[in-house]
Amino acid sequence: MPKVSVIVPVYNAEKYIKNCCENLLNQTYDDYEVIFVNDGSSDNSLKMLEKLASNHDKIQIVTQENQGQAIARNIGIKHSKGEFICFIDIDDEISREMLEKLMHAQKKSDADLVWCDAYIKREGNILSTLDQTYPNSIDLQKNYVLHNASPWRKCIRRSLLESYNLYFPKLRFYEDLAVVPSYGLYTNKIIYVNEPLYSYVLHEGSTMHQKTYHRKLEDIFESMEILSNFIECSICKDSIKDELEYLYIDHLLHAASLRFFEFENTEIQLDKIVEIMKLKYPSWKKNKYFKQKDWKYKLVCHLLYRKKRKLLRYILK
């Protein structure tokens, strides 16, 4: 039985497979399997994966009709055999030493979850590391909740996902935000490896950089509600209130509002965000993590909340 199961959803990704697999299939750590979940690809992705599998005995390929990344990851979990689960996005890259360093830290501490920093890259160039832009807490559990809205760059004990039903909801967008931060609430020990072992690659055609409006962007509302319910039902709910409030500020009031703001006729969605914040977190401006952000971030949040959209549009020109 492998120690780690690496799960990689694949949908029409023929142009990314070679680059992603270069280090993934040549790790300095040996005790792992790779599960590619082919999510109904119509290009040459499946053929490319089958060719790779013929040369690598660590590879398992699971094929399903196109149901989205969330269901693909859940299918991957069900087919996995490893004690730990590691998710990778097919258009991203990892260090050859990622699994070795993560599992060394896990073994040394007997942690249930271990995660690392990541590079942000575009067109092969490193723009920054992911964690340098975030607020921080000295508490490792709270710091994990603040930093992790996506499943990649971490290994988590599979039994926790199964025992607490921490599967991805059937959303097309924001399915990871709905569940990943709550991983930290069910672990006895979390370890952070302060090294960028994962590279998150920005693409112009990606979901969050699209040029035309897609109604599935509105999945953010259901995603935040699911996340809130996860946290409210946990034994940590009273100690994690500030962190949940910050997630609403960061992912709903700031990030989602700016995405809606890019398109015409989204006043209803922008108004809905403001109403949610007024109802759930009327004192959000006092949040201790919000206070760690820079003045530009704070100004955008204030203008969005006060519906000063013409002024914001002028400032963002």
Image: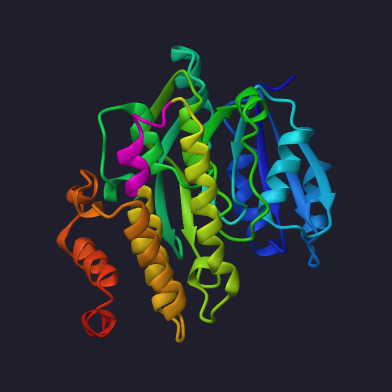
- Disc count in the image? 0
The residue nearer to you, when weighing 303 against 113, is 303
Task: Based on the picture, tell me whether residue 184 belongs to the magenta stretch.
Answer: no
List the single residue furthest toward the front: 279
Q: In the rendered view, how is the structure colored?
A: rainbow
- How far across and down, in percent of the image, does residue 110 sit? 49, 13
- How far across and down, in percent of the image, does residue 308 sit? 24, 78
Name which quarter of the figure residue 84 lies in: top right
Q: Quadrant of the N terminus?
A: top right
Task: Based on the picture, tell me whether residue 239 belongs to the magenta stretch.
Answer: yes
Q: Is residue 301 visible?
A: yes
List the single residue furthest toward the left: 295
Q: Is residue 56 visible?
A: no
The residue nearer to you, when weighing 213 against 7, is 213
Tell me the residue at 24%/45% (across/down): 289
Tell me the residue at 60%/41% (across/down): 87
- How far across and down, in percent of the image, does residue 305 sit? 28, 68
Tell me the residue at 23%/85% (across/down): 314
Q: Quadrant of the C terminus?
A: bottom left
The residue nearer to you, when weighing 191 against 237, is 237
Q: Is residue 115 left or right of residue 179?
A: left
Relative to 317, say whether 251 is above or below: above
Relative to 151, say whether 257 is above or below: below
Q: Which stretch is magenta? A: 236-246
- How far across and down, in percent of the image, does residue 102 sit? 49, 27
